[in-house]
Amino acid sequence: MRFPFGATSGIFQRTLQLVCRYLPQVKSLTITVNGFITGDVLLHEIPSFKYLKRLHLWETWLWDPMIKEETLPPKKVAGVEDWEVVISRAKELCPTLVELEFSRLSRLRFGYSLY
């Protein structure tokens, strides 16, 4: 699954809900986020997956769940330790999940141009 750049957390959350609803036995899911996600959205939706073993999130940065999207500076990047917290919590909330990998967004994108 691939999101266009600039997809909001709401779109990401709704997509996870639809995948869980219409593909309830999905075991492996790869998402190219192409932007930011929040840890709280991921942790809120992950328990709904009963069979998910592998989740790969490519081209993404993690937003601090306590910061509102509108107030986030454009160059805010969370540290690896934040991902480690999200990964460990996701594995606790979804006992079948054995692998959650991510790759950082290679560069900030504004609209259709790259800098």
Image (cartoon, helix red, strand yellow):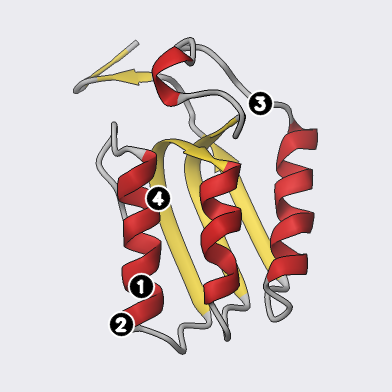
Q: Do the residues labelled 2 and 4 touch (CB within 8 Å)?
A: no
Q: Residue furthest bottom?
A: 25
Q: Name the residue under label 1.
A: 19
Of the image marks 1 and 4, the number of the one nearer the N terminus: 1
Quadrant (top left, top right, bottom left, bottom right) of the C terminus: top left
The secondary element bearing badge 2 is classed as: helix
Residue 67, quarter of the rendered image: top right
Question: Which is nearer the N-term, disc 3 or disc 4?
Answer: 4
Distance Cα–Cα, label 3 vs label 4: 18 Å
- Look at the image and tell me whether residue 55 can be seen: yes
Residue holding disc 4 = 32
What SS does tag 1 mark?
A: helix
* Circle 2 residue: 22
Mark 2 and mark 4: span between their CA atoms? 19 Å
Q: In which quarter of the image is the N terminus?
A: bottom left
The 10 Å Cα crowd at callout 3, few under 14, some 14 to 19, many 20 or more, is: few
Q: Which of marks 3 and 4 is in front?
A: 3
**In contact (CB < 8 Å): disc 2 and disc 1:** yes
